[in-house]
Amino acid sequence: MQGVTDLKTELPFIGHKHRQIPTRRTMNFANLPLLCLWSLWALGHGPGWVCGQAATQPHSIKIEGDITLGGLFPVHSRGPAGVPCGDVKKEKGIHRMEAMLYALDQINSDPDLLPNMTLGARIMDTCSRDTYALEQSLTFVQALIQKDTSDVRCSNGEPPIIAKPERVVAVIGASASSVSIMVANVLRLFAIPQISYASTAPELSDSNRYDYFSRVVPPDSYQAQAMVDIVKALGWNYVSTLASEGNYGESGVDAFVQISREAGGVCIAQSIKIPREPKPGEFDKLIKRLMETPNARGIIIFANEDDIKRVLEASRRANLTGQFLWVGSDSWGSKISPILKLEDVAEGAVTILPKRASVEGFDQYFTSRSLENNRRNIWFAEYWEEDFKCKLTRPGLQPDEGARKCTGDERIGRDSTYEQEGKVQFVIDAVYAMAHALHNMHIDLCPGHTGVCDKMDPIHGRTLLHYILAVNFNGSAGTPVMFNENGDAPGRYDIFQYQLTNTTAPGYRAIGQWTEYLRLNIEDMQWSGGQKEIPSSVCSLPCNPGERKKMVKGVPCCWHCELCDGYQYQLDEFTCEMCPFDMRPNLNRSACRPTPIVKLEWSSPWAVLPIFLAILGILGTVFIVITFIRFNDTPIVRASGRELSYVLLTGIFLIYSITFLMIAEPGVGVCAFRRLFLGLGMAISYSALLTKTNRIYRIFEQGKKSVTPPKFISPTSQLVITFSLMSVQIVAVVIWLGVQPPHSIIDYEEQRTPNPEFAQGVLKCDMSDLSIISCLSYSIILMVTCTVYAIKARGVPENFNEAKPIGFTMYTTCIVWLAFVPIFFGTAQSAEKIYIQTTTLTISMSLSASVSLGMLYVPKVYVIVFHPEQNVQKRKRSFKAAATAVNASTRLSQKGAQNGESKDEKPDSLPKVMYISYTELTMVPT
C-alpha cells in the first residue's frame, strides 16, 4: 500500500509522563479529520520517528540540495474503491514529474541563476486523489512543527532516533484543482508558497483564502471566457455543460455559465455533473439526459480524461456519433488518450489549451532516459513496463509467463510512441519562477554572499511569496512568465479541433488562439464527415424576415416566430409596427414602401365602353342639333318646341360629356367641372321634359273644363319655367363649391385590401358616394316628377303623340336608374370600386340620355331626313276647336266603353277633325 509511514500511537491521558511507541506500521490519513491530524503532529508523532533505525520516506523522490522544493504530481491514477492508487499515468504523471527533474538539472547547472547554490526536491505522488494528496503534503510541513520529545521512549526504554526532516521552502504543484485546493489550505497555515503548473479553478484566484497560491497557467475564468467567445463565433446560443464533480469541473462550468449570462446571447439547456464515483450505467443515463434537449448539440465539457473517455464511449453506445459538438477545456486539450479508439465520436471537437510550445531540450532529455541512468525516479520502472508493454524481472516475484520480458535496451521514442505532454512547459516555468524568486531574494538579502546567508536560513514564506509575485522572465516557450495580484498568469490559449478526415494531417489542428480576444479561423474547421458548414446548436432557428421573436418565458435564447401580418412591418427583432397609412410593407416586411396610386386610365377596359357610348351619343346629339338648325322653320321642328328642344339637347350633350370628366385625371379643375356638370346635364334635360309634360297635361286638363287656355304655355313661359328649375341645381353646386373648394385626394382606404400586396391608393376627387348621389338627387326628383306627369298624360289622344314618347322615355329612364342604385352601392366594398362605380354611373347616364334622344328626336329626324313630304304645314286650329275635339273624343270613348268596346281601341267613327297634332296646339295663339 502506498501511504505515509507513521507510527501507530496509543494516546494516553493528558499529563501521562511516557507514551509507548510500538512497532512501525502504515496508516492512511484519508478519513481522519484535519484537526485530528494536526493533533497527531502537535503531539510529536509523524513520519521519521523510528525506534532503533534510521527514518525513511518511501514512495517519494529525494533530490539533495541547499534549498528543497516540494513537488506534487499525479504519477498514478485514482484507484478503485478502497485502493488509493491505480495505474501509472505516462504523460500527466511521469512526463510532468520528469519535467521538474529536468528543470532542476538545468537550474543547478546554470552559473548565472542561483550561483553556488543548488535546488533539491522532495517529490510526492498524489494518485489523482485530493485526500491522498493531503496525506502526502503533510511531509512538507514536518520541519515546521515544534515537538517536545522529552517524555517519549521506545518500548525498550531508549529514546527514539529522530531524523531531522528537510525543510521544504515552497511546493511545485499540484495538477488537479481539487488537489491544489486541499493542499493550499494546509500550506498557507505554515506560510509555504505554492506554484501550480496545471490547476485552473477560478476559486484559487481568491487571494484571501489562497494567499500563498500562484500558478503559471491562466485560471478557468479566462478559459471560460475564451469558450464563450468560441461558442458565439460559431453562432451557437443553446448549449449544455458537463462537469466532473470537484473544484476544477464545477468551478469551470460555473465560470462559463456566469460569463455567458453576463455577456448574453448564450443559454444553458442543461448543466450535468459527473459523479466522483459514477455507478454502472451512469454515463448512459447522462447521454439520455443530454438528448432531452436535442437542439442543444454543443456540449461544454470541463472533465478529467477518464470522464471524457467514458462520455464518448456512452455516446457511441447510444449510436449518437456526430450528434454532439464537443467543446473541451484544457483537461482535454490536444491529448490522444481521452479519444483513443473513439476518434469518430470526437471528430469535430473544439478544445482549448493554454498557449504552449514543445521544449526541445526536454525531448532530448526524456528520450535518453533509461533504467540505468534514471534510478532517481522510483516510478520509472512502472512507466517502462507500461510504455513498452513488457514486464521487468523483480526479486521475489514470479514472472508472468504470457508477458514479454523487458530487455532494458528499449528506447523511448524509438520503440514506443512519444509525444511531449502539454503541461511540461508549465512545470518547467513553475520551477524556474521559483528559482528566479529565490535568486532575486538572494540578491536583496545576501548581497555579495556566496550560498545561503543567515537572512535566508530559514527562508520566510511571506518574503518568498513577495518575490514570486514579482518575477517577470521569458519562459521555456519564449512567452513572458508573470503573475497578477491574485497569483494568476495571463490568459493565452491555443484552440484546436480534432479533424479525422483531414488527410494532410489527421488529428488535432490549431484553428485559432485567444489572448484577451478571440482569433478563430473558421475556414480551417471541419466537422463530422468532413463537412465545412458549421452545425447549429440553437434553441430556435432565426426568424425569417418579417417575423418577430416571441420569447419563451425564462429562456432568453428560445422563441417562437410570429409573422408581422396585415400592414405591419418588422421594426426590430421583437416588434412589429404598423406602416403609415400611405404606405404598405415590402415583400419581406422589413420596411415600408409607398402604396401605388391608381386612377381610371383612358386605356382601361373599364373606360372603353363608357367612352364609346359617350362618343356615339355626342355624335348623335350633334347630328340632331345640326338637323334641327338646318330645318329650324319646318313644321316638325317647330311642332317639337324648338326652344325647349335645344335646351333638352344641350342637357343631353352635357350628360354624354360628363363621361370624359369622370375618366379624366382628377385635379382642381376637373373636380370642379365634375361637381358642376354631373347633375347639371340631367337637371337641364329633365327640367325641359317636366315643363313639356306639365304643359301637355295642363292643356288637356283645362280643355276638359273650358275652352280658355291655361296660363304659361307660351314658348317664353316654358323657357322661364325650365331655367327656373335648372337654377336650383346651379345654385346648389355654386354654394357647394364655395363652402368646400374642390380638390383631388388620394384615398388609401378604398382599396386597402387584407393582402397589402393588392393595396392601392385611389386618386380621385373629394366626392364621396353620398355626395355623388346628392348631386344627382335633384335630377332624380325632376325625373320622378316628370314620370308622374307622363303617367297622368297617358290618356291624351294618339294624334297628340308628344306625351307618349315622353312617357316611354321616363319609364325606361326610371328602370335604368333603378338598376344603377344597387350596383353603385353594392360595389362600395369592392377592390374594383373605382372602376365599377365610375363605369356604372357613366353608362347609366349615357343610357338615360340615349333613351331621351332615341325616343324623342330620332323619329323626328328620320321623318325630316327620309320623309320630307310629311314635314308640311297643317291647317291651324284654334284652342277652342282643339278643346271641342278633345271633349268629343272623351264622350265617344265613354260611349264606346258603355257599348262593350275596349277603351283602348280607336273608334272607327272618330271624326277626322280630332286628329290634330301637338303642333297645332303650339301654333294656337294665346
Image: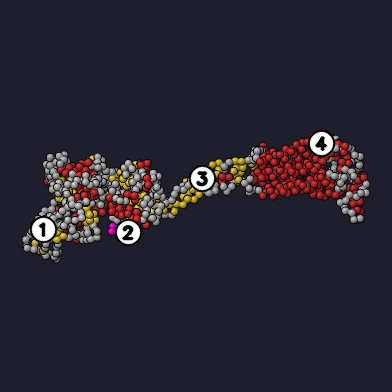
Q: Secondary structure at mark 1?
A: strand
- Does the magenta-highlighted stretch encompass residue 325? no
From where the camera sits, is residue 716 visible? no
Packing grade of label 4 (10 A; few <14, some 14-19, many >=20) is: many
> Viewer-proximal residue, 617 or 926?
617
How far across and down, in percent of the image, does residue 387 sit? 22, 49
Q: Earlier in the sequence, mark 3 or mark 1?
A: 1
Give me the disc on residue 473: none
Cα gap from disc 3 to disc 1, whole angstroms: 88 Å
Residue at the far front in the pictured view: 402
> Viewer-proximal residue, 375 or 837?
375
- Amino acid residing under circle 3: Arg
For the point 31% across and 60% down, which residue is it? 280
How far across and down, in percent of the image, does residue 747 sit? 61, 43
Packing grade of label 1 (10 A; few <14, some 14-19, many >=20) is: many
Q: Which residue is mark 2?
A: 282
Q: Earlier in the sequence, mark 4 or mark 2?
A: 2
- Amino acid residing under circle 1: Val
Magenta region: 276-287
Q: Which residue is mark 3?
A: 589
Q: Earlier in the sequence, mark 1 or mark 2?
A: 1
Q: Which residue is mark 4?
A: 628
- Amino acid residing under circle 4: Phe
